[in-house]
Image (cartoon, helix red, strand yellow):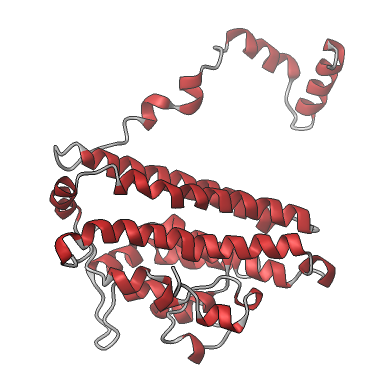
Amino acid sequence: MANHQDIISQLNNKYESIDQDLDTHLNGLLHSKPITYWDYINTDSLLSLQTQRTDLPDEMVFLMYHQVNELLFKMMLWELDQLAKAENLTAAYFSEKLSRVSRYFDMLSSSFDVMKEGMEIEQYMKFRTTLTPASGFQSVQYRKVEFASTEVINLIDNRFRAKRSKDITLEEGFNELYWQAAGIDFKTGKKTFLLSSFEERYKDELIQFNQTYKTKNLWTLFKSLPSEVKEDQTLIDAMRHYDYTVNISWVMAHYNAAKYYLTNGGKTVEATGGSDWTKYMHPKYQKRIFFPELWSKQEREEWGQNV
């Protein structure tokens, strides 16, 4: 451990580098309060963010569960941002960051039992009507995770993907993104309130975000690596695991939880946002794959069929 004089010297260098006076900061320490857990975590603020729309107890489970999801999405974006900004990427660093994000998605996948087993169907079917037309579809952070993971072409609705240029921009392809299937009638072009309100709030932000990640998303970064790095089997395995975890494991966990509630009694119930959730969510329809060239032709064709 460094002695006091060494610490003082390092502190002096630190504050000199930003034109600050060390003595002023040391004097400030005399009056500062010790940090506590509740201050650091902002516990009181965090626990005040749950506002139910009904008096049904299980709505609190639903509400807090989705807030936890959003915190995990923020953790994912934190890791993806570090990868995007990294210089001289190595296979080890790339693999480590991917593994971190995959673990967050593993948590999400395994946590759906919190909702599936943690809410009474009768309560859910009552409080969900007060959430219309809101939908988990409207999580902008998840959309950003997708844009930070792959190129726009791989997020185009499967009905149109083969007809579009691989270099399609987000501005060109926005109306054909796979999640537009949740809120647009492609025969009439009419958009639901679910979709139009989401676009009004976030479209410009997403386009700007995608501009940043156009050359920095995981797939583009991987393809730009030297051959010896791209051929690293640990990295390839990490890429495939992440792809499968996000686009099959997590999606199917979400799908099965929705199915548990929305097909209760043998009748399929419409999602709160009004989407055809069975085709919007199930991977066998959209065949959404972040890193298509890392999978064989047969694997791509059978994507999501055996789950």
Q: Is residue 209 visible?
A: no
> Which quarter of the picture shows residue 297?
bottom right
Q: Quadrant of the C terminus?
A: bottom left
125 on left or right of 217 = left
Q: Is residue 46 above or below residue 82?
A: above
* Residue found at the far front of this picture: 306
10 on left or right of 299 = right
Q: Is residue 87 above or below residue 111?
A: below
217 on left or right of 235 = left
Q: How many marks?
A: 0
* Residue found at the far top of this picture: 30
Q: Residue 268 location, x and y as percent?
A: 19, 67
Q: Residue 102 location, x and y as percent?
A: 57, 53
Q: Residue placed at 58% from the left, 84% from the top?
A: 166
Q: Nearer the viewer, residue 209 or 40?
A: 40
Q: Is residue 159 visible?
A: yes
Q: Residue 226 location, x and y as percent?
A: 82, 70
Q: Residue placed at 37% from the left, 29% from the top?
A: 45
Q: Quadrant of the N terminus?
A: top right
Q: Nearer the viewer, residue 240 or 11?
A: 240
Q: Residue placed at 26% from the left, 81% from the top?
A: 185
70 on left or right of 92 = left
Q: Residue 101 location, x and y as percent?
A: 58, 52
Q: Residue placed at 52% from the left, 82% from the top?
A: 301
Q: Is residue 6 above or below residue 118?
A: above
> Which quarter of the picture shows residue 296?
bottom right
